[in-house]
Amino acid sequence: MKAQIIDGKKIAADIRQELEPRVAALTARGSKPGLAVVLVGDDPASLSYVTAKERDCEKIGIGSFDLRLPRETTQEELLALVDRLNNDDQVDGILVQLPLPDHIDADCVLQRIDPAKDVDGFHPLSLGRMLLGLPALLPCTPQGVVEMLQRSGHDPAGKEVVIIGRSNIVGKPLSVLLALKRPGGNATVTVCHSRTRDIARLTAGADIVIAAMGSPEFLTADMIKPGAVVIDVGVNRVEDPQAKRGYRLVGDAAYQDLLEKASAITPVPGGVGPMTRTMLLHNTVCAAEARRATGTS
Ligand SMILES: Nc1nc(=O)c2c([nH]1)NC[C@@H]1CN(c3ccc(C(=O)N[C@@H](CCC(=O)O)C(=O)O)cc3)C=[N+]21
């Protein structure tokens, strides 16, 4: 039996459709939601993500402000820009694309963003609120993974979930979300990482395996139990002279190998990536609604 392919593009399109009336209502009141996207430097992968985010905004009627800064931008200059965006009433959401150049302290920049505009959900206040189960802007990829599981009929409640990877933007917050006592949570979560002694022993027992460590095709069929659900968060560019753009996108899971053994799997591309982008739009709409309601605009 071949695995169910969880169509991230389709689920993302459904969510965008649900967002449309909310964008329309905000716009009708004369205050269309706005997202500021800050990119420092010209890394080609970052540039293509940022361009895609701006295109997503336009399609749904969210205003986008693109701020491109040269690689040599100083930390002070970047902080001054964040301050300006914090104080700009047209801006409901601020996203500073990661990674930042080495001479800039990313944590310092992320902490400068007004938590009310923190649509990436990376601010310590946002993450702290999430940890406590309080209303918060949630990180986009973890939130996208949870939505994807719920909407494809694989609610994590009561399931044993193994996450490979403990990054601040995916593995760590996702482990919290999945264990929270709330819809989309209530799972039993294990986090594996580079110091885990035997990853395959842990993944072999899991109902849901989430690969999020940035290692091309790391997760293979021999590591999962038959019928497990596989969520692939990886987006690795692998050189391929035969491919259109000179590279291929490969996930952290060996897709072809897993197709025969998993009961459901997310593809790359077309899986978690489109969900991440759509949750950014979702967070921007939520931020805009909340800012209007609290009279900060
Ligand atoms: N402040 C910040 N927030 C982020 O959310 C953030 C970031 N920095 N830095 C980089 C990572 C990476 N990321 C992706 C989002 C969508 C796709 C995506 O849509 N991928 C498409 C394919 C895109 C392609 O063809 O290259 C797919 O999987 O179908 C990929 C990667 C967000 N990130």
Image: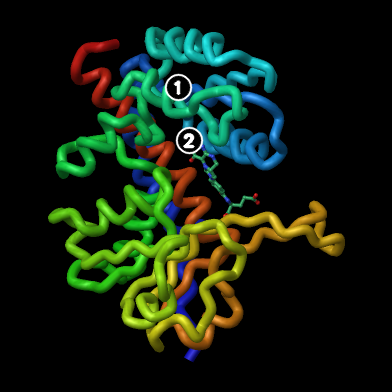
Circle 2 residue: 60
What residue is at 15 percent from the left and 38 percent from the top?
A: 134
> Does 98 sit above or below residue 150?
above
Residue 67 point in image, percent of width and height? 59, 19
**Position of 261 compared to 127: left or right?**
right
- Which label is found at residue 126? none
Residue 58 point in image, percent of width and height? 54, 31
Residue 197 point in image, percent of width and height? 41, 71
Q: Which of marks 2 and 1 is nearer the N terminus?
A: 2
Q: In which quarter of the image is ligand 1?
A: top right
**Position of 8 compared to 148: left or right?**
right
What residue is at 38 percent from the left and 32 percent from the top?
A: 119
Instruction: Assign a secondary structure to mark 2.
Output: helix
Q: In which quarter of the image is residue 193?
A: bottom left
What residue is at 85 percent from the left and 64 percent from the top?
A: 242
Q: Nearer the viewer, mark 2 or mark 1?
A: 1
Circle 1 residue: 109
Name the residue nearer the viewer: 202 or 128.
202
Q: Can residue 245 be seen in this view?
A: yes
What residue is at 60 percent from the left and 29 percent from the top?
A: 102
| Crowdedness near tag 1: few (<14), some (14–19) or many (≥20) residues, C-alpha within 10 Å | some
